[in-house]
Image (cartoon, grey):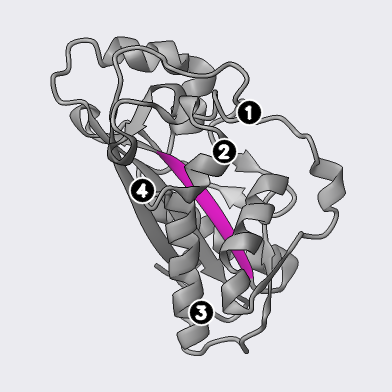
Amino acid sequence: YRPFGTKYNHLAPMTDNITFATTSEWKIDQASDFLSDYGITVQKPPSFEEFEGQKWTKEPGGVDEYAIEIQSDSFEEVTEYKAYSASQRLDQPVIVEDTGVHIDSLNGFPGPYSKYAILTIGVDGIVKLMEVQSDRTAEYVSVVGYCAPGEEPRTFVAEQPGKITREQQFDPDNPWADALLNPIFSPHEIDDRTLGELPPDQIIELGSYPMKNSTQAFGDWYTSR
């Protein structure tokens, strides 16, 4: 993948400080925990405080202070461009992360459009689409992207296998209860419960938790290159 046809033939100098180009405080905190054993310090991007508490945009894709999010059916393509655009804007090494749910019987929908699907048809709309589907297998996908000035972007993918439940199951007091498809996604690792029923600390501890695995895959590559 070479944005705008540009080819890079060298690596930027390795640094122990990586900027997470996101407006999400909890993503930064999680990445810091997941990368702590690698000696990598995850730092907030400039002017981060301007975005604290910001709600999701209702547009499919968009532009924020740090990265351009294109519309694509490919998680990797979306993440590569986010990482590339953020590294160019900030002129420093960055990581980004994109997540969504791939439903097998819906040909991968909503996939990279998961956030937009929830903002439009909602979780109930996904449940409706799945009413006639006998195959309910799905995967929660996390893709971490890395790019530095002078480098091509790289992506690190992790999938959490599971299934879509026939109705919403969640704890209304759970702060992650309504995150994306959490109320209807049941990882194989936890039998018939959904992520909407599990508190955040238990979700993060799951061996299949995709953001942990994609972030640590980046850490493995970064520290061994």
- On the image, the x and y values in percent for residue 90 come to 73, 66
| Image height of 39 relative to 207, above or below | below
Disc nearest the viewer among 3 and 1: 1
Quarter that holds the N terminus:
bottom left
Residue at numbered disc 2: 200
Q: Nearer the viewer, mark 4 or mark 2?
A: 2
Tell me which amino acid carries mark 4.
Ser
Report if the CB atoms under discs 4 and 1 are less than 8 Å apart: no
Q: Which residues are magenta?
A: 94-100
The residue carrying pointer 1 sits among few (fewer than 14), some (14 to 19) or many (20 or more) residues within 10 Å by Cα, namely few
User: Quick one: SS at disc 2?
Assistant: helix
* Disc 3 from disc 1: Cα separation: 32 Å
Disc 3 residue type?
Tyr
Give residue 175's mark: 1
- Dominant SS in magenta: strand
121 horizontally vs 88: left or right? left
Task: Give the labeled residue for mark 4.
Answer: 74
Residue at which label 3 appears: 222
N-terminal of the pair, mark 4 or mark 1, is 4
Q: CA distance from mark 2 to mark 3?
A: 27 Å
